[in-house]
Image (cartoon, rainbow, N blue to C red):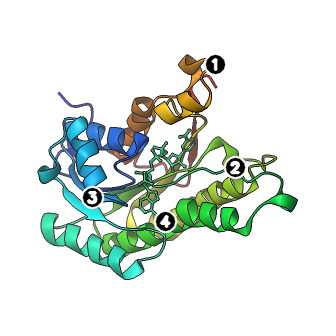
Amino acid sequence: MAIYPELAGKVAIISGAGGNLGITVSQVFHAAGIRLGLVDLREDTLRQRLREANLNPDEALLGALDLTQKRAAIDEFVGRVVAHYGKVDILVNVAGGFRAGGPVHEMDEEIWDFMMNINAKTAFLLSAAVARSMVARQGGGRIVNIGARAALNGVPTLSAYSASKSAVLRLTESMAGELMPYGITVNAVMPSVIDTPQNRAGDPSADHSKWVTPQSIAEVILFLVSDSARDISGAAIPVYGRA
Ligand SMILES: NC(=O)c1ccc[n+]([C@@H]2O[C@H](COP(=O)([O-])OP(=O)(O)OC[C@H]3O[C@@H](n4cnc5c(N)ncnc54)[C@H](OP(=O)(O)O)[C@@H]3O)[C@@H](O)[C@H]2O)c1
């Protein structure tokens, strides 16, 4: 039996669904009986990643969107999910990325814009579209964002990343307050280093067993969207593993 039987039949939108964490969240949600609306930059890559993860791409509603800029297209995708499934109960904003920019006094302007857009603006635009739909339906909801440990303090040479993930936490707290009257919770999880093939390749000599796995983070997210977490909102939960 599923740990959270109340989740069967719920509808979730997951952004960055073809990435390391996004594909695992998609798997864990599918196993819980949640119906999926999945967004990523490219549909062909998303379909391939879903097949590799033993998920049938045709069972989910897919969207190929640049979540940093196409507000009308984002609103249209959320409308398509609502038309298809009748509602959206859950949003997980996984889309994001990382660039180290070096010291601020040497950093290119493009790094700042890229980090703020890919991490903060994606969460803002998709959350706004989904929250409007949840508020209008008056059926409550769950939104989960992905912060990072680097959101808690400025980190030398990582200013843009750190600031962009701090923005995600402030967005989380603001929306938690705004949406509390509607029974919509908004929380964030904060990974440290995730155990991904890219991170392993970038730091081959590190003790990878200390890094948090996508599966472990996905299970925390599943808890946050369950009834058991109904009274938690505005939280930023550390999921550091042993790193
Ligand atoms: N990896 C880590 O160690 C780590 C640590 C702390 C926090 N995080 C956060 O955890 C989340 C997931 O990380 P991850 O390692 O799974 O990243 P990932 O594998 O790079 O996955 C991110 C996904 O988001 C997609 N994406 C990027 N820009 C987008 C846009 N503008 N519109 C729509 N989709 C977009 C990417 O597509 P493309 O691949 O086509 O670009 C990719 O499929 C991110 O928010 C990241 O910042 C990661």
Q: Which residue is mark 3?
A: 43
Indicate if the residue with disc 3 has its beta carbon within 8 Å of ligand 1. no
Between the residue at mark 4 and the residue at mark 1, the CA separation in whole angstroms equals: 33 Å
Of the residues shown, which amino acid type is indicated by label 4?
Answer: Thr
Q: Earlier in the sequence, mark 2 or mark 4?
A: 2
Q: Is residue 238 above or below residue 211?
A: below
- Mark 2: amino acid: Ala
Q: Say if disc 4 is inside 8 Å of ligand 1.
A: yes
The residue where tag 2 is placed is: 100
Which one is earlier in the sequence, the residue at label 2 or at label 1? Answer: 2
* Residue 196 at x, y percent in the picture: 48, 32
In the image, what residue occupies the spot 35% across and 73% down? Answer: 74
Circle 4/circle 1 CB separation < 8 Å: no
Q: Is any atom of residue 222 visible in this view?
A: yes
Mark 1 belongs to which amino acid? Ser
Q: Which mark is residue 205?
A: 1
